[in-house]
Every structure is written in C-alpha cells, then in structure tokens.
Image (spheres, helix red, strand yellow):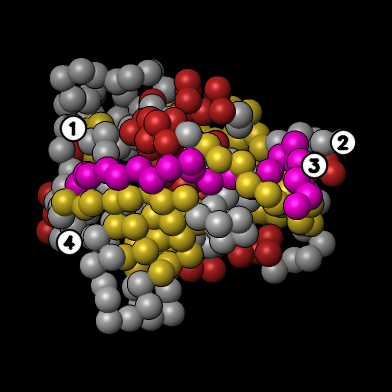
C-alpha cells in the first residue's frame, strides 16, 4: 500500500463525541453526536428523530433554506437543521472537512451561545488526518452584494481568509458601532471569536416568543442587551464580544462549501442570509473562483 503524505490533508475527528444541549428557538433538549466521517464526504447533519424520509442534510450553501435568525439547512425531503453556524465556525477553524453530526431535534445545541463547547469537544476527540489532499476555494475576483445599508463582499487575498466586519446598533450604547479584523487561524479563533456569545435585545424577546422563537433563550446562553447595558450578571467576556460573535457567525457561514476560503471577506450590518446570497453569487460566476489543493498553493 502506498502511503500518501499531504501537508494539508482532509481531516475528521479521531473519535465520536456526544453532547447534550438545548435548542435556542424550539426550546427542546437535543442529544448530539459528532462522528468521524470518511474522506470526501463533507459535513453532514443527520436527524435521528426522523426515520420515515431522507434524514441526511449536507451542510452546503445550496441547502441553506432560511437564514433570517440563524443558518438553517433543508434537504429535498424538507428535513431541516437550524443553528448550524457556531459548530460550523469551529469546524472551519480546525479545518475539519468530514463529519457526521447526528441530532434528535431540529436545531444544533446552542450550548453557552458561543463555539467554546464545540472547541472543547473537538479537542477532546482529537483530529485525524485523512488520506486525501484538502481542497480550498480561492477567490479570483471581487464579488459583492448590497441590500439597503448591508454590504458583503469576497475579494482576492494572498494567504488564507481574513475577515473585516462591522455592526452598528445606535439603540444600545453598550454595542454602538463596532468593527473587527480577524486573520483566521486556530489561535486567533480560539482566543478572540470562539468564546463570543450570541446576543439579543431584551425588547425583542417577547416578539420572538410570540412567533414561537427563542423559547430556549436564557442568560446562560444569550447576552441580553438593554439600552445601556446587559442583563447577564457576569457582564461581557470582552468589550468587543458583539462584533466578535458576528465574526464567528461569518466564519461558520463561510464554511458552506466545507473547505477553507482563500480570500478577504468584508461584511457590514450583515446577517446569515446575506452570506448565503453572496455564496450563490460567487458560485454562479466561474471567473470568480477556482478550487485549488492547499498543498499546491503553499508549495
Ligand atoms: Zn451566532
């Protein structure tokens, strides 16, 4: 047997990792398993609570169905999985391109609202290198999308992925205008954005609950924002936790091809759906990108 040695191989976990949590929107408990998957299979969610139709939902941009409050996937049978973005962010940072994620509820566990617990699970499992070279998507020309005061774009960049993000919430002095720059590598991800929690406005919670959403939200998993501060007794983990969290969301949403992105992302006042629309625009333009082997790029 010939042993292939790639500097940048595809990766999965070494061993299966279970976890239990709560769904943010439906409020149900969810039991999950992160399970090693063969090379070339990508990230796949499997709804074990559904057995009468196709319950496998691959995490690709074409399956993103509803991305207003979180990133939701749905397959052709209409089976959906929501709130994938924080787990996807951690998988992106660790370069894990093959994984089977089993869950028995419609949403990925929110955990503490950040990617911290997924980082711990990945580190406990360990990372297995696979016998296949890792592909990446290299951005060749600027593609942008504007929607009111929302701007998102991907541009060519020498090196890996850099992100520049901006949010503006003048209605809360604790958030206000924030900008962030992230050069994505594992250390920066773990130290800066992986720990940043989901946030929401206290004034909007009642409205969301009336819509049947945010039933699992609590001060244990969401930073509750008021006009002049936050309700959480422990306060913020970092003064820039809000924009760091938006950046975590973007790292997750930029992994919808299950391969690293070589390019520069800029996002202003953006949401999940804008990143998905941007992906669709990039993928529809064959001059905008090429698929490369990381081994070739980094020779
Ligand atoms: Zn988020």
Disc 2 versus disc 4: distance between alpha carbons?
Answer: 52 Å
Residues drawn in magenta: 1-24
Disc 3 versus disc 1: distance between alpha carbons?
Answer: 42 Å
Do labels 1 and 4 touch, CB within 8 Å?
no
Disc 2 versus disc 1: distance between alpha carbons?
Answer: 46 Å
- Residue 170 colored in magenta in the image: no
- The structure residue drawn at horizontal position 75% and vertical position 45%, both measured from the top left corner, is 3
> In the figure, residue 265 lies in which quadrant?
top right
Rendered location of residue 120, percent (x, y): 38, 30
Q: For the residue labelled by badge 2, is the local secondary structure a helix, a strand or a loop?
A: loop
Do labels 2 and 1 touch, CB within 8 Å?
no
- The structure residue drawn at horizontal position 22% and vertical position 44%, both measured from the top left corner, is 21
Q: Could you say which is closer to the camera, residue 254 or residue 136?
A: 136
- How packed mark 1 is, by other alpha carbons closer than 10 Å (few <14, some 14-19, many 20 or more), is few
Q: Which mark is residue 66?
A: none
Q: Kindly identify which residue carries mark 1.
A: 220
Do labels 2 and 3 touch, CB within 8 Å?
yes
Do labels 2 and 4 touch, CB within 8 Å?
no
Q: Kindly identify which residue carries mark 4.
A: 211
């Amino acid at each position: 047997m010939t042993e292939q040695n790639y500097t940048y191989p595809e990766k999965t976990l070494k061993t299966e990792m279970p976890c239990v949590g709560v769904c943010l929107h439906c409020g149900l408990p969810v039991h999950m398993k992160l399970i090693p998957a063969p090379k070339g299979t990508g990230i796949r969610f499997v709804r074990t609570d559904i057995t009468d139709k196709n319950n496998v939902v691959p995490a690709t941009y074409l399956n993103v169905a509803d991305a207003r409050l979180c990133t939701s996937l749905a397959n052709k049978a209409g089976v959906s999985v929501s709130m994938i973005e924080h787990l996807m962010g951690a998988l992106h940072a660790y370069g894990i391109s093959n994984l089977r994620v089993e869950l028995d509820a419609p949403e990925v566990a929110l955990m503490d609202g950040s990617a911290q617990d997924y980082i711990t699970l990945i580190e406990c499992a360990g990372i297995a290198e696979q016998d296949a070279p890792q592909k990446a998507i290299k951005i060749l020309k600027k593609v942008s999308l504007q929607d009111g005061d929302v701007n998102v774009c991907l541009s060519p960049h020498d090196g890996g992925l850099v992100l520049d993000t901006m949010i503006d919430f003048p209605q809360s002095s604790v958030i206000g205008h924030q900008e962030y720059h992230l050069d994505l590598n594992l250390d920066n991800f773990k130290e800066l954005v992986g720990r940043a929690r989901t946030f929401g406005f206290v004034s909007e919670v009642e409205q969301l609950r009336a819509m049947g959403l945010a039933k699992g939200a609590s001060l244990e998993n969401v930073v509750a924002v008021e006009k002049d501060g936050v309700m959480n007794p422990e306060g913020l983990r970092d003064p820039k936790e809000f924009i760091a969290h938006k950046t975590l969301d973007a790292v997750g949403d930029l992994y919808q091809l299950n391969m690293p992105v070589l390019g520069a992302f800029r996002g202003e006042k953006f949401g999940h759906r804008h990143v998905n629309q941007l992906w669709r625009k990039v993928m529809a333009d064959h001059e905008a990108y090429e698929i490369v082997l990381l081994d070739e790029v980094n020779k």
